[in-house]
Amino acid sequence: MNESAHGVIDAHCHLDFKQFNKDRDAVLQNAKDSGVVHMINSGVDYSTNQRSLELAKKYDFISVTLGLSPNTLEGLNEADLNALLAQIKDNAPQAIGIGEAGLDYYHTKDAGVRAHQAKVFQKVIDLAGSLNLPLVIHSRDAEQQALDMVKHLEKVVFHCYSGTLSTMKEAIDRGFYISIATNLCRSGRHQILARNVDLNYLLVETDSPFLSPRGGRNEPSFVQDSVSLIARIRNMEPQDIARITSDNTKRIYNIR
């Protein structure tokens, strides 16, 4: 993209994933050169939580959230689950949020699997509440149920939001934040969300290495594509979208 704005924060990515093993430092430099000043790396299971913590120690422009994705639960026994929850709790002082965690009804139609996801999600919800940290929600085809489960919390981010306008409005009315990913650039549905979201509760993310706006592997610098498009949709300047979304990200995650 020709337009780029300085000061953007990629509010959700997975830089520890194997897709970046060969050129991670170059990807990080590309992001910084493009105007991305901070990146939030989100864990999804025990090993990615650990790798995310290591990244945050190595780079002062990376923060970490520690999570348990619903898509990682298969084969996880009770002892594994308890070890993972203990890992999150023990390392919470190094984290800015809990998640991603939630419900994924897109990938499973089985009622038993869905019930198990909800049971585990409740454990993570309780943990986030006890730690007083923002909860980062992964929810596909279950946004309203996820919202219903977290209504008592004060700090919530709906990562990669793909739900309805009405659920989005209800979430925002509760003071929750909506993070829109770079699939915005190839999805009319997400562009409608971007047109209607309250900008005071909007975050932007790549979900790298997934959801590339350009095809192939996504990376944090591509968040600029979303910033430019949202600016056009809202008849604003990219720099203003960068400033607003960065301020929102700093506010919810208490980033100084």
Image: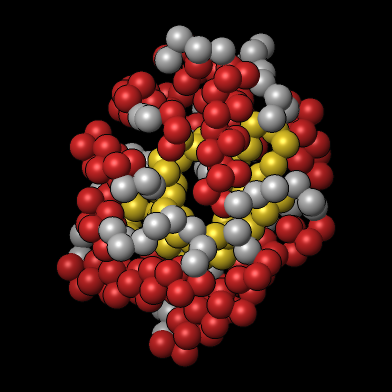
Residue 216 visible in the current orientation = no
Q: Is residue 225 above or below residue 212?
A: above
- Quadrant of the image containing the N terminus: top right
Q: Position of residue 83 (x, y in %)?
A: 53, 84
Residue 243 visible in the current orientation = yes
Quadrant in the rendering for residue 186: top left
Nearest to the observer: residue 159 or residue 234: 234
Q: Is residue 82 above or below residue 101?
A: below
Q: Which residue is rendered at x = 33% and y = 72% of the image?
A: 122
Left or right: residue 253 versus residue 200 is right
Q: Which residue is rendered at x = 67% and y = 61% of the image?
A: 52
Q: Is residue 197 above or below residue 178?
A: above
Nearest to the observer: residue 234 or residue 105: 234
Left or right: residue 198 versus residue 220 is left
Left or right: residue 252 versus residue 188 is right
Left or right: residue 171 versus residue 251 is left
Q: Residue furthest left?
A: 111
Q: Position of residue 149 (x, y in %)?
A: 27, 63
Quadrant in the rendering for residue 101: bottom left
Q: Which residue is rendered at x = 61% and y = 27% of the image?
A: 243
Q: Is residue 33 above or below residue 100?
A: above
Q: Position of residue 209 (x, y in %)?
A: 58, 44
Q: Which residue is rendered at x = 58% and y = 36% of the image?
A: 247
Q: Position of residue 227 (x, y in %)?
A: 55, 23
